[in-house]
Amino acid sequence: MDAAEGLRRIRIVGYSILALGLLLDALALVGCLSAWANHGSPALLGFGVLGIEVSAFAAVILLGAWIVEGFVAAQNPSSE
């Protein structure tokens, strides 16, 4: 597999994980707003903590792909 194709796939996985984390954060926000409006307990708050952790993991994946992409581009200057 070409290095550029591998990095493209890693970025797709990173963005997919990031989307999952942001979806969990949005779910927690909607749950908190719903609980606030109904004077209840924010039962979905745990999703927010999990969403932040998943988003941070995705950021590490995307940062790693960006760093590796820099090394690949430095080794192959004609591919730019």
Image: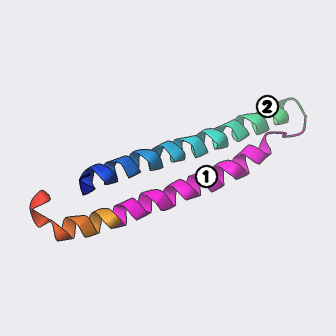
Q: Position of residue 39 (x, y in %)?
A: 90, 34
Task: Read off the residue under disc 2.
Answer: 34
Camera-side residue of 77 and 47 = 77
For numbered disc 1, what is the local secondary structure? helix
The residue at the far front in this view is 1
Residue 46: in magenta span: yes
Quarter occupied by residue 69: bottom left
Q: Report the amino acid beneath label 2.
A: Ser
Instruction: Judge whether 30 appears above or below 6 on screen.
Output: above
Marker disc for residue 62: none
Which color mode does the image show?
rainbow
Name the residue located 70 percent from the left edge and 40 percent from the top edge.
Answer: 29
Mark 1 surroundings within 10 Å by alpha-carbon count, few (fewer than 14), some (14 through 19), many (20 or more): many
* Quadrant hosting residue 53: bottom right
Provide the secondary structure element on which disc 2 rests: helix
Q: Relative to 70, say whether 33 is above or below.
A: above
Few, some or many C-alpha atoms within 10 Å of disc 2 (few <14, some 14-19, many ≥20)? some
Q: Which residues are magenta?
A: 41-67
The image position of residue 30, as x and y in percent, is 71, 34
Q: Residue at x 69, y 50 (%)?
A: 50
Q: Amino acid at mark 1?
A: Val
The chief SS type of the magenta part is: helix
Rendered residue at 76%/35% (across/down): 31
Badge 1 is on which residue?
Answer: 54
Residue 7 in the image: state x and y as whole percent.
33, 54
Q: Is residue 61 left or right of residue 35?
A: left
Query: Whole-percent x and y of residue 66?
Result: 35, 61
